[in-house]
Image (cartoon, rainbow, N blue to C red):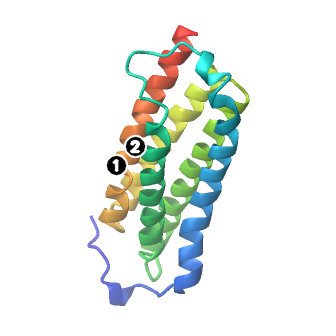
């Protein structure tokens, strides 16, 4: 396994573009989720039969606020871990691509589940998101361990959410 690059060996990314690239996609994902969820909580979602382990509604925005902050910090750190060149750079681009694929799947899940009321297909989106989060963790590890570690609670929550999604599908 290649050794971690020293900070002095990394090219510097301008701070503002790096911050924007880390925060804006996460804020967009959160906004899409909020817009798709809000109108459906009191009506459609309230009418679903849920398993005994379903958290109270207030727990979801609390959990997601914390997770989205960790996801943005993870992206910021990964963006700052860009190797200077060579094969390590290609691996970094792969980790970054995986990061944004899992984030796109995150943005897709809420409209599929809440807006389209497609509980079954939402399981597939959630499972694909979990796989891509795990791939992102594995690919990011060699560039920035904290960046990878910040995604572990997110992976655990998405694993739980996938189980919850499947239980709701089964009960309804």
Q: Nearer the viewer, residue 59 or 25?
A: 59
86 to 74, vertically: above or below? below
Q: Position of residue 106 (x, y in %)?
A: 57, 44
Residue pictured at 62% horizontal, 16% vertical: 47
172 to 61, vertically: above or below? above
Q: Position of residue 135 (x, y in %)?
A: 43, 48
Q: What is the quadrant of the C terminus in the image?
A: top right
Q: Nearer the viewer, residue 143 or 58?
A: 58
118 to 34, vertically: above or below? above
Locate residue 126 relative to residue 67 in the image: left or right: right
Asked whether the viewer can see residue 21, the reply is yes
For label 1, the SS is helix
Locate residue 31 relative to residue 16 in the image: left or right: right
Residue pictured at 42% horizontal, 53% vertical: 66
Q: Position of residue 166 (x, y in %)?
A: 50, 20
Q: Tags 2 and 1 in contact by the CB under 8 Å rule?
A: yes
Q: Position of residue 153 (x, y in %)?
A: 35, 47
**What residue is disc 2 on?**
155
Q: Nearer the viewer, residue 19 or 96?
A: 19
**What residue is disc 1 on?**
152
Q: What is the quadrant of the N terminus in the image?
A: bottom left
Locate residue 3 relative to residue 51 in the image: left or right: left
Q: Residue furthest bottom?
A: 8
Mark 1 burial class by Cα count in 10 Å: few <14, some 14-19, many 20+: some
Residue pictured at 59% horizontal, 21% vertical: 46
Residue 140 found in image quarter = bottom left
Mark 2 burial class by Cα count in 10 Å: few <14, some 14-19, many 20+: some
């Amino acid at each position: 396994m290649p050794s971690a690059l020293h900070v002095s060996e990394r090219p510097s990314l301008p701070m503002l573009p790096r911050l924007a690239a880390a925060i804006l996609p996460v804020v967009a994902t959160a906004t899409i989720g909020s817009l798709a969820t809000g109108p459906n909580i009191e009506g459609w979602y309230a009418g679903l039969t849920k398993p005994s382990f379903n958290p109270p509604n207030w727990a979801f925005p609390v959990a997601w606020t914390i997770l989205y902050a960790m996801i943005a910090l993870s992206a910021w750190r990964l963006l700052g871990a860009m190797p200077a060149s060579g094969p390590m750079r290609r691996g970094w681009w792969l980790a970054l691509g995986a990061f944004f694929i899992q984030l796109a799947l995150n943005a897709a899940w809420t409209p599929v589940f809440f807006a389209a009321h497609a509980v079954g297909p939402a399981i597939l989106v959630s499972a694909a998101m979990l796989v891509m989060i795990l791939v992102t963790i594995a690919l990011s590890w060699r560039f920035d361990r904290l960046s990878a570690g910040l995604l572990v609670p997110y992976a655990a929550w998405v694993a739980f959410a996938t189980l919850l999604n499947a239980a709701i599908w089964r009960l309804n």
